[in-house]
């Protein structure tokens, strides 16, 4: 295209834009400051207030926001919606779920909506720093003390969880489950064919993956970046042990210590056993490589079990599980919970939803499908499969640590700085720079300030 044509085109574009803007912003008639317009204004304000009041009392519907759209997750949510529909047949459930594992997309959409003053009535938020540091700190959600009293939830929710959903004596969300983050899923047939035992330490894991490296299978299946952060936190736990891992989040473990350097080295080594197309795989894609026989191991939270079951896979045949090597005896947990928006458009609908979410019926319908155990302590274990029964036992007997990727231990800014540092490390593999960036993140947004 010649320069002359290009300039003419540009000029036409600018002219069109100018005309459109001029049309769109035609000055309004100057408002006469007389009594009639004042009266009209008062009427308008009254009308808006009436509409707002009507909306608050509106129990005709409830809009619930989550990131459970597929792969075992949607099925779990559907099971709880069924209980809700049976209990509240007159309230329409609007499922506003946004796709993308770990809420990476959903949380961005939610932030935009909250900023625009357009909150869903109730949304999914992780118990811990994510809930307290973001939604409570931003005055975006309401305290649920009265509901806890009325429903008797204090007696049935685990003591470990209450501080993670409370701020200054008020409780802010309804936990629906407990998930485990530090699970290594494996293909039993592949291990057997290669004469391998399930590894329990980092060294055993490396040795097993060295053997597998010489075969056709991928030693460790990996997916997109949030799953790499998930892998990193579990390797930190496995390499440091739970005391030192916990100390990273309260300032008692030094991010610049040789132990953290060694954990980063372990992580760098773990990455050498993974598939090269990880960035383009969802967590479901990566987990599926294991049950399809293309990969031996995958580290993923136990929502993967919900997915394996949805695929029709049989526990202990098509897949096995163990704590991530180095973290035997530790249950690294996270908990999905639901909130009540500060200015929920349908507060009554939202309260009804939260009652279902916190109920025994709701949790017993949801969790066996979702691949999690109930947050409530009174669910019937018989309703759960063999994996989840083992998770219940571990939750009751193991040392408990919290997840970084899923909102427990670090606030959103700190987590995002760690994630940025990880992103750079994945590109440049500079372990020293990674460790410095992790320390800097703790200084700017964590307890090292
Ligand atoms: C987590 C969430 C789980 C599961 C997972 C994968 O953050 O707590 O329930 O949805 O993401 O999407």
Image (tube, rainbow, N blue to C red):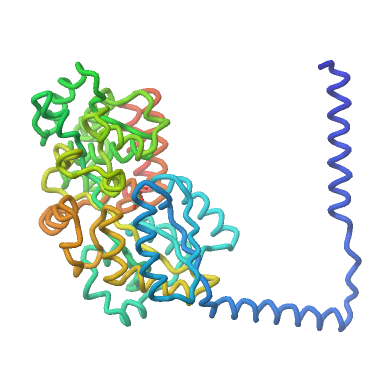
Q: Is residue 44 above or below residue 287?
A: below
Q: Position of residue 213 (x, y in %)?
A: 21, 19
In this rendering, position of residue 66 left or right of residue 361 = right
- The answer to which quarter of the image holds residue 288 is top left
| Front residue of 291 and 352 | 291
Residue at the location (54% across, 80% down)? 57
Q: Position of residue 307 (x, y in %)?
A: 31, 46
- Residue 422 in the image: above or below residue 334: above
Residue 382 is situated, as x and y percent measured from the top left of the image, at 15, 62
Say above or below: 16 vs 369. Answer: above
Left or right of 81 in this view: 95: right
User: Which residue is painted at 59% across and 80% down in the image?
Assistant: 53
The residue located at (40%, 73%) in the rendering is: 143
- For the residue pair 411 and 211, the one nearer the viewer reads as 211
The residue at the far front in this view is 312
In the depicted view, which residue is nearer to us: 350 or 95? Answer: 95
Answer above or below: position of 46 versus 105.
below
Quadrant in the picture for the N terminus: top right
Tag count in the figure?
0
Q: Position of residue 348 (x, y in %)?
A: 48, 77
Q: Residue at x 25, y 38 (%)?
A: 299
State left or right for residue 273 relative to residue 61. Answer: left
Q: Which image quarter: residue 423? A: top left
Which image quarter: residue 280?
top left
């Amino acid at each position: 295209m010649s320069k002359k044509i290009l300039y003419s085109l540009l000029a036409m574009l600018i002219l069109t834009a100018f005309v459109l803007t001029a049309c769109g912003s035609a000055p309004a008639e100057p408002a006469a400051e007389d009594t009639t317009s004042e009266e009209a204004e008062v009427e308008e304000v009254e009308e808006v207030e009436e509409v707002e009041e009507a909306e608050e009392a509106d129990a005709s519907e409830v809009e619930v926001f989550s990131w459970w759209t597929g792969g075992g997750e949607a099925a779990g949510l559907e099971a709880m919606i069924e209980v809700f529909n049976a209990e509240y047949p007159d309230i329409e459930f609007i499922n506003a779920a946004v796709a993308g594992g770990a809420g990476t997309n959903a949380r961005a959409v939610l932030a935009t909506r909250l900023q625009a003053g357009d909150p869903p009535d109730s949304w999914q938020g992780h118990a811990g720093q994510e809930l307290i540091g973001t939604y409570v700190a931003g005055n975006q959600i309401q305290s649920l003390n009265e509901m806890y009293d009325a429903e008797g939830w204090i007696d049935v929710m685990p003591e470990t969880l209450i501080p993670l959903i409370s701020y200054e004596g008020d409780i802010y969300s309804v936990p629906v489950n407990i998930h485990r983050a530090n699970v290594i899923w494996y293909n039993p047939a592949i291990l057997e064919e290669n004469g391998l035992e399930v590894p329990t330490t980092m060294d055993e894991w490396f040795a097993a993956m060295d053997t597998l490296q010489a075969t056709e299978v991928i030693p460790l299946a990996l997916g997109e970046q949030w799953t790499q952060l998930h892998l990193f936190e579990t390797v930190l736990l496995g390499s440091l042990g739970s005391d030192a891992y916990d100390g990273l989040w309260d300032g008692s473990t030094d991010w610049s210590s040789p132990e953290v350097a060694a954990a980063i080295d372990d992580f760098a080594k773990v990455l050498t056993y993974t598939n090269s197309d990880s960035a383009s795989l969802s967590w479901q894609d990566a987990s599926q490589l294991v049950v399809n026989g293309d990969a031996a191991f995958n580290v993923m939270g136990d929502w993967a079990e919900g997915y394996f079951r949805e695929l029709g896979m049989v526990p202990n045949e098509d897949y096995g599980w163990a704590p991530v090597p180095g973290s035997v005896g530790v249950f690294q947990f996270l908990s999905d919970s639901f909130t009540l928006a500060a200015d929920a458009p349908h507060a009554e609908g939202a309260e009804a939803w939260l009652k279902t979410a916190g109920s025994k019926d709701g949790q017993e319908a949801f969790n066996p499908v979702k691949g999690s155990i109930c947050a409530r302590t009174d669910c019937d274990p018989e309703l759960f499969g063999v994996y989840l029964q083992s998770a219940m036992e571990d939750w009751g007997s193991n040392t408990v640590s919290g997840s970084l990727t899923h909102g427990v231990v670090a606030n959103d800014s700190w987590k995002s700085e760690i994630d940025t540092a990880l992103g750079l490390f994945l590109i440049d593999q500079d372990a020293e720079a990674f460790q410095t960036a992790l320390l800097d993140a703790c200084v700017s947004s964590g307890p090292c300030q």
